[in-house]
Image (spheres, rainbow, N blue to C red):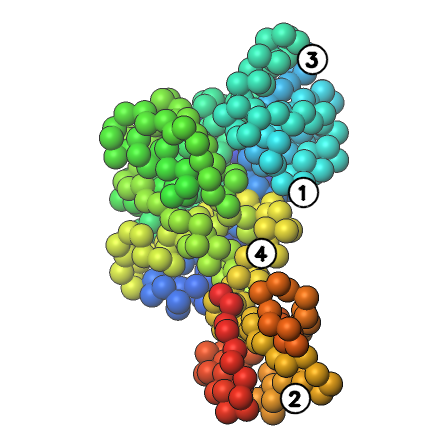
Amino acid sequence: MVELSKIVQAKRRVASIVNKTPFVHAPILSSEVGAEVFLKKENLQLTGAYKIRGAYNKIASLSDEDRKKGVVAASAGNHAQGVAYSAREFGIKATIIMPEATPLLKVTGTKDLGAEVILHGDNYDEAYSFAMDYAKKNGLTFIHPFEDEDVIAGQGTVALEMIDEVNDLDYIVVPIGGGGLISGVASVIKQIDPKIKVIGVNSLGAPAMYNSYKAKKVQNLSSVRTIADGIAVRDVSEINLKHILECVDEVVTVDDEEIANAILFLLERQKLVVEGGGAASVAAIMHKKFSFKKEHKIGAILSGGNIDVQMLSVIIEKGLIKSHRKMKLLITLIDKPGALMGLTDTLRVANANIIEIDYDRTSTKLSYGDAKITIVLETKGKEHQEEILEKLTQNGYEAQVEV
């Protein structure tokens, strides 16, 4: 584990830069899961994620000579913005290598902080390999996103703030990508209050650290695929795995469906915008991935809020359909005057609100004289949708629900 004194020093170092983000009770979530849940809102951090803590601590730890050379980093987005912000504070140049599929929000956010951005590779690990070569060729100082003791110490300051606010936690739940955050958090907890259990959360689509924890040795992946791009790490850090094996009580996985559910819950019920990696901790709690009781106090780290707007839109749309607040129907009509009006009148009687409609009479799958209607309705739940389908059947319409 990383020495506590080093993490305390990091806390002093970053205090003038980072926000001391809220760590507060979440009554709605607590009621939902049957335990007392507290949310550490690192999604409200300066750059929208905790990564600025480790990045700033690392750059502040460099010699003047190394800082003057400039710095380079590889990142899917949050570390990038942390390095870019910190470099700007020190008045030095930062070059960030990002995977080509990085969400536009994170690319533009990094550029807006003054860094040069180079897009390279299909994932973080390919960007990392390119960044290491780029640093050597250009004489730059490489700022690793997680396999660095100064970076880990900076991330560990999250836990110091948490136990300052709530000193009787039973669990702390931490998303895992490369393992820097959980290495720092677990190092703090096991040196201050080892009774607190630290739970790590991997995405099922990028379970390298989960597999490695179970096997107690590095288990790299050939590829990753998850909506939680911030924790989509293919290769395991041996250094961080050692920290995790020493200090972490359990590692679990959540799938994309569970992550999406958590994102939507946090947005709608807690009024918080959280990205996939940031919501992984809440997903693990909501879907009971580890055992806890009603009297337990659980701290969940929302590690970041830099979610791509298009991804958020897809999650919202799917969520509305799954919660029966929106339904999409396919109906075939006889293509004649008044046919569509008859359909819409039936839907009006059923109190269904039409929000989108498409009328197709040219599909080769249709018989001549027919038209295919695709209609999207705003509805009030499962019972309301059943009532709508019943009304349509009573009026002679055959409706297919598209899911």
| Amino acid type of the residue tagged 1 in the rendering | Leu
Point 39% across, 67% down: residue: 32
On the image, the x and y values in percent for residue 374 come to 62, 71
Residues at circles 3 and 4 in contact by the CB criterion of under 8 Å: no
- On the image, numbered disc 2 is attached to which residue? 342
| Amino acid type of the residue tagged 2 in the rendering | Gly
Q: Earlier in the sequence, mark 2 or mark 3?
A: 3
Q: CA distance from mark 2 to mark 1?
A: 45 Å
On the image, the x and y values in percent for residue 279 come to 48, 50
Q: Earlier in the sequence, mark 3 or mark 4?
A: 3
Q: 382 or 198, which lies in front?
A: 382
Point 57% across, 61% down: residue: 316
Q: From the viewer's perspective, is residue 251 above or below residue 330?
A: above
- On the image, numbered disc 4 is attached to which residue? 314
- On the image, numbered disc 1 is attached to which residue? 105
Point 61% across, 89% down: residue: 346
SS assignment at label 4: helix
Label 4: few (<14), some (14–19) or many (≥20) C-alpha neighbours in 10 Å? few
- On the image, numbered disc 3 is attached to which residue? 68
Q: From the viewer's perspective, is residue 264 above or below residue 392?
A: above
Q: 184 or 265, which lies in front?
A: 265
Q: Earlier in the sequence, mark 2 or mark 1?
A: 1
Q: Earlier in the sequence, mark 4 or mark 1?
A: 1
Disc nearest the viewer among 2 and 3 = 2
Q: CA distance from mark 3 to mark 1?
A: 29 Å
Q: CA distance from mark 3 to mark 4?
A: 43 Å
Residues at circles 2 and 4 in contact by the CB criterion of under 8 Å: no
| Amino acid type of the residue tagged 4 in the rendering | Val
On the image, the x and y values in percent for residue 175 come to 43, 42
SS assignment at label 1: helix
Q: CA distance from mark 4 to mark 1?
A: 16 Å
